[in-house]
Image (cartoon, helix red, strand yellow):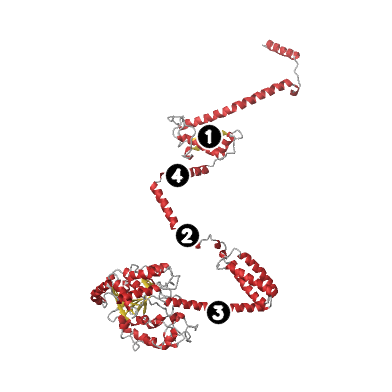
Amino acid sequence: MASSSSSASSSAAAAAAAYPRSHLPLWRRPGLLALLFILLCFLSFQVVIHVPYARSSVSRWLFADYQSKHKVSGNCPGCGDLQDMNDADKTIAYTDQHGRIKLFKVTAREFASSSIWKNPSLPRDSQKQEAAQELQLATRPEDTNLSSADTLLTKNVDPIKLKRQVFRRKRKEQRTQELLQMDKEVELQMRTAATNRSRNFDNKVRGSYNIWRPEFHHINTDSTLRLMIDQIIMAKIYATIALSQKESDLYASLMKCIKESQTAIGDAHMDSELDLSALEKAKAMGHVLSSARDVLYSSDEVSRKLRAMLQSTETNIDAAKKQNTFLVQHAAKTVPVPLHCLHMLLTTDYYFRDGVIKEHFLDAALNEKEHKAKLEDRSLYHYAIFSDNVLAASVVVRSTVANANEPEKHVFHIVTDRLNFAAMKMWFISHPPRLATVHVANIENFKWLNSTYCSVCRQLESARLKEYYFKAHDPSSLSDGNENLKYRNPKYLSMLNHLRFYMPEIHPKLDKILFLDDDVVVQKDLTPLWDIDLKGMVNGAVETCKESFHRFDTYLNFSHPKISENFDPRACGWAFGMNMFDLEEWKKQNITRIYHYWQDLNEDRKLWKLGTLPPGLITFYNLTFPLNRTWHVLGLGYDPAVDLTEIENAAVVHYNGNYKPWLDLAISKYKPYWSKYVDLDSSHVQHCYTSKQ
């Protein structure tokens, strides 16, 4: 053993001696360096060739492992071992930019049902996953590299955003299916309804209040117009001064600008209606006014001119107001041509009866006995109407009967004057109301109504009162600005207006009666009024006072001691027009005597002006029971702001004021409540009102 080792060491020593070891550095060995470089290039080439293959193998291995864990059967053709892709998650393996392997899972339910699948060998559910990937890739067209697209698909996907896109797509599909499945008849109905809505759209009224119109673009829609008007006023002042100071050129320039500005303004009420050249005219006027001010300005003289113009304008305004009041009063008391025609036709038919008219009179004579018994029957509902207007009285009767629950129990007592008796009688003979009873009486037949008994009759016959009405230059006539023109209506000369104070004399055998003016319309059944307990009061009426309005001091002269000592100026006023009178209490309280007493004291019209409401307030003072306001709504003859809801809910609406519904002055939005009860089937009405048109 020792001999062998010694021999080996000796051989090694001999070899070392024969081949001594070199100690040269590596860079001095070019052959070895070349060998190492070739080896490095070979290894790099192998890495480039085999890494993609290794990556693909790892991905297949991971996906195969997922399939084995979920135990997916292979009973669907073209999907391998996948069975239900609705509940499966698709796992995507990839490497990021640093070479690390990443995994990403997407549930098949998150894909839209409307996706288009490219692989026909795969079932629809498995194809959804590929479409979802393509959808995400399509959202980033700027990425052209496949690997970078895959990276963006898996790295930047927002699940909430993806679900939102899926929901929108589903909703769009559902709406599309609904439109496709819509019945043709339903579609036709929708088109017809839309067409009708467009045809019935009234753009005239809406157009006048449209916020998109030019005049609504600015807060001050008439600022330019007002500026030009002010310029014209100042130009007139300077023109007057220039004329007085013989500045002829300046005067001519001012007058020229005034004329041009007035032409540009025309009938405009806002800036949008001005002429297109208005702004240029205003600028030119401004330059001329500036020059005039430099030459002519004198504060004292300008102030004097302005005061003179102000006084002149105030005088003109007062005159215009008086003229307007006079014309309105004149129009209110005139009889329209169609209404006059109606009275004339009825009067002619009454006196010159042909065959048809004779039949009407025969029927009226047959029913007269039955009607006469009803006139004094206390179990029926009685109405008192005093009117010389046939059409107005017919509307009151027609509207009351139309809304009555038991029209056969309603009796109307109409009193008119001698001039209109024939027309009124003829109308209700030829147009009898349904089941109700109407009796027309002539005021001339009331023999007890004379100047001996009646204070008003005596006063109406006085020359002093006639002068008040008919003499234009009388000290108390139209020229007296302190007098209210509305009290100069000749209706106050008619005794029909004062018959309401003589109810027991006209209807001695009745215990209750409802008074109605001829300018009212009944909208509900009024029979519950007879069941109201008036608590011992004589008059049942609706109060009209609101804060400081329509109280006693509005109607009576409280500077007179007789008034101030007996009445409260803050007492609430009430309305004539619909009044329930208890005639038994009337007789007990001797109301007519009270009325006569105060009428005699007011012969010189110092206690109140003419009319029936002031003496009514005095006569029934502390004897009026307030009714609910819904029974009687007033103001349709003068107030355009009455609440339409109140009108609709009212039992009686009253056109008190000058704008009566049968006049052209009537407030148009209130007129239908009255006109719908006009008997348009009447040949008389058709003849008179058609000929007018």
Give the distance between the C-alpha atoms of the residues marked 3 and 1, in whole angstroms.
97 Å
Amino acid type, callout 3: Thr
Residues at discs 3 and 2 in contact (Cβ within 8 Å): no
Amino acid type, callout 1: Ile
Residues at discs 2 and 4 in contact (Cβ within 8 Å): no
| Residue 172 in the image: above or below residue 32 | below
Instruction: Compare marks 3 and 2 and give the one earlier in the sequence.
Output: 2
Residue pushed farthest bottom?
A: 452
Rendering coords of residue 277 (x, y %): 61, 64
Q: Which residue is mark 2?
A: 203
Give the distance between the C-alpha atoms of the residues marked 2 and 1, in whole angstroms.
63 Å
Instruction: Compare marks 2 and 1 and give the one earlier in the sequence.
Output: 1
Rendering coords of residue 90 (x, y %): 50, 35
Instruction: Compare marks 3 and 1 and give the one earlier in the sequence.
Output: 1
Residue name at image x 38 percent, y 83 percent: 619
Helix or strand or loop: what does disc 3 sit on? Answer: helix
Helix or strand or loop: what does disc 4 sit on? Answer: helix
Mark 4 neighbour class, 10 Å CA radius: few under 14, some 14 to 19, many 20 or more: few
Residue name at image x 44 percent, y 56 percent: 199
* Residue 613 visible in the picture: no
Quadrant that contains the N terminus: top right
Helix or strand or loop: what does disc 1 sit on? Answer: strand
Rendering coords of residue 40 (x, y %): 67, 24
Amino acid type, callout 2: Asn
Q: Is 522 on the left or on the right of 286, as rendered? A: left
* Residue 512 visible in the picture: yes
Q: Give the foreground label among 2 and 1.
A: 2
Q: Which residue is mark 3?
A: 315
Q: Which residue is mark 1?
A: 92
Mark 2 neighbour class, 10 Å CA radius: few under 14, some 14 to 19, many 20 or more: few
Residue name at image x 41 percent, y 81 percent: 490
| Residue 80 in the image: above or below residue 521 | above
